[in-house]
Every structure is written in structure tokens, then in C-alpha cells.
Amino acid sequence: MTVGHNLPDHHYTSTAVRQGRHWQTRCDQYPGVSCQARTLHQAAEQQRRSLAHVTDMPEASITVEVVPVLPDAVRRRLSRAKELRRMATWANHAAATEIRAAARELARMELSLRDIGSILGVSHQRAHQLVSYGTEPEKR
């Protein structure tokens, strides 16, 4: 259990549009609450203060998510980056599975952990971990 202000949290979203060197930000739930700020962080803080005033709630109970409107080209690149990261995560997992399988095959050939490490480009301690991965520890 966490100890806190015991106030309900109120979450709001604000849309931010870049205009020159500033972000023009408007609360989606309270369109009359708007501000202009140099950074998205500053915009969120200003929106939070304004919402506290408008809703008569303590600032500590208000969170604001600022959603910037981005050009299509940037959104496409960010979407592609997210997809590539997902693919990289999958590829890293697959590579780790293959390296463990290779380590086990080398161990079945009765190679030393030092030789397995040299072949895989890892330390002998890491080779031991790869060979032992997923096996039950010995009971004493």
C-alpha cells in the first residue's frame, strides 16, 4: 500500500501544435485551457496548473499527457523505428536461443568450456552459463 495524498488522480490530454519556436497547447477535455510554451514539458506543467485552477482540484491530483501533432513523415519514421525495435527484440531473442543451442552441441562434443568460449567469442564463465541455461540445478 502506498501512502499519498489520498486524492483521486485526474488524467487529461492536451494536443500540442508547433507554431514557430513554441508549442500551442490546448486541453482536449477543457478546450478553453490553452497555453504557449517552448518545450512540451513546460506545456504539460502549464496545463496542469491551469487545470487545477479551472477544476478547483489540487495540482498534485492532476496529470497531463501532452500529445504533439507531428508531420506525417516524422510519424512514419517513428512507426518504422518502433517496428524495427520489435524486430530487433525478436532477432536478439532468436540469436540467444541459437547461441545456447550451439553451446550445448559443442558441450556434447566434450569440448572444454574454454574452447566453447573461444568458439563463441565469450568467456569460459559465459560459456558455462550458456551450456547450463534452463537446466535444473543439482540438489545436494
Image (cartoon, rainbow, N blue to C red):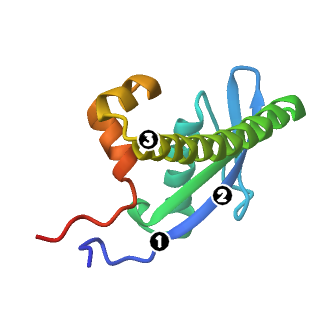
Which amino acid type is marked by label 3? Met
Q: Residue furthest front?
A: 109
Displayed quadrant of residue 37: top right
Q: Which residue is mark 3?
A: 109
Displayed quadrant of residue 130: top left
Judged left or right of residue 14, residue 45 is left
Mark 1 or mark 3, which is nearer the start of the sequence? 1
Q: Is residue 126 above or below residue 139?
A: above
In this view, the mark in front (3 or 2): 3
Could you tell me which secondary element the residue under label 1 belongs to? loop
Judged left or right of residue 107, residue 27 is right
Q: Nearer the viewer, residue 52 or 96?
A: 96
Q: Nearer the viewer, residue 89 or 34?
A: 89
Q: Quadrant of the C terminus?
A: bottom left
Could you tell me which secondary element the residue under label 3 belongs to? loop
Give neighbour class at mark 2: few <14, some 14-19, many 20+ (Cα, 10 Å).
some
> Picture coordinates of residue 135 (x, y %)?
36, 62
* Label ID, residue 13: 2
> Picture coordinates of residue 129 (x, y %)?
33, 45
* Label ID, residue 9: 1
Could you tell me which secondary element the residue under label 2 belongs to? strand
